[in-house]
Image: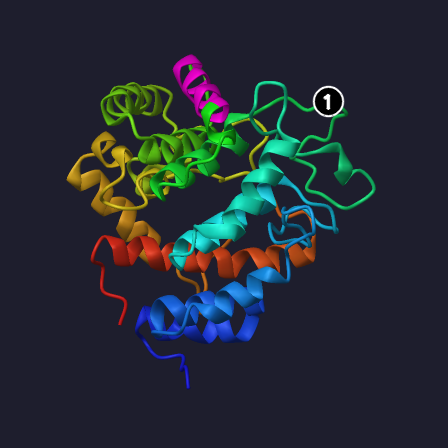
Amino acid sequence: MAGTGADPLARAEHFIWLTARVLEQRRFAHRFLDGDPDPVETALTAYRNEDGGYAHALEPDLRGPVSQPLHTAHALGVLDSIGRCEGLRVERICRYLSDVSTKEGALPALLPLQRGYPAAPFVPLVDDPPAELLATGPIVGLLHRNEVWHAWLFRATDFCWSAVDALEQSHPYEIEAAIAFLDGVPDRTRAERAADRLGRLVRGQRLAVLDPARRAEYPVAPGYAPGEHHFPHDYARTPGSLARRWFTDEELERSLDHLAAEQQEDGGWPVNWRQWAPGTALEGRPLVTLRALETLRSYGRPLG
């Protein structure tokens, strides 16, 4: 039985059992309680549609029954976390991605099928949405990292390279998508060069809070919620990420200290993006909590 004791993991476990969806409960049990991966996959299947995509608020900021690339990226992340990013399940996903791609062979953030169903106001809904690195980069990087080979990946990879090379003025979530691509793409020499340039961009445009004690001095990107800052650990989620090179040991340690201190009294971590509906905030916090625990563990921080 989970308790509300002092150690971070026990407090987080209590929060997960109290508030999380079945999928996040199963993911927590698999990752931190030596649970079997099968229940994770079973819970994820409830979000899958016949077209091979995923829906039903798997990504909490998009509601309704229509498949969307952002839901499907979320699903791939879950499969990756249990070591099952392979086989027929991923073949079906790649067919879906190919079917909904733009003429560039890449993915829009939001398909117009969403019209009529609730969606976050900060995700623009247009009739002919453009391909975006934000939607395409994380999927392409993850598939490459899992050595998935599919015809869709060729043009999508080319799109991501062009988008990364063209980045000048950017914002934190786009940089996160870029580094997710670069961390997985096979051409490591080119990826390292591109990551070095992005690191200079992040520091030059002050897209990472390097000293949490001076957080208020850092800009917030246009369209973000007040206080929606990013920190070094948001880019370098594991020590093996190319983004780890962007920050000094001291900067990263301050960032991880800040992340650990963000755990709330109820055991969960807070959502810092714009909260536009009660359900999205409730569903988002367990996701943020899982990510925080994963990041802290990857850097060897004690959890309990």
Relative vertical location of residue 110 with respect to residue 292 in this rendering, above or below: above
- Point out the image quarter for the N terminus: bottom left
Residue 247 visible in the current orientation:
yes
Q: In this view, does 35 lie to the left or right of 155?
A: left
Q: In this view, does 280 lie to the left or right of 146?
A: right
Instruction: Look at 51% across and 63% down and name the residue there.
Output: 41
Is 157 covered by the magenta stretch? yes
Q: In this view, does 303 lie to the left or right of 170?
A: left
Relative vertical location of residue 291 with respect to residue 193 in this rendering, above or below: below
Question: Where residue 62 sits: x, y (%)?
Answer: 67, 46
Relative vertical location of residue 107 with respect to residue 71 in this rendering, above or below: above
Q: Quadrant of residue 177?
A: top left
User: Helix, strand, or loop for circle 1?
Assistant: loop
Check disc 1: other Cα within 10 Å, few if <14, some if 14-19, many if 20+. Answer: few
Q: Name the residue under label 1.
A: 128
User: What is the span of residues highlighted in magenta in the rendered image?
Assistant: 155-166
Task: Give the dominant element type of the magenta stretch: helix, strand or loop.
Answer: helix
Is 171 covered by the magenta stretch? no
Instruction: Look at 22% across and 44% down and name the residue there.
Output: 239
Depth check, front residue: 210 or 132: 132
Depth check, front residue: 175 or 225: 175
Residue 12 visible in the current orientation:
no
Q: In which quarter of the image is residue 225?
A: top right
Question: Where residue 145 sits: x, y (%)?
Answer: 34, 40
Q: Residue furthest left?
A: 249
Identified by mark 1, the residue type is Asp
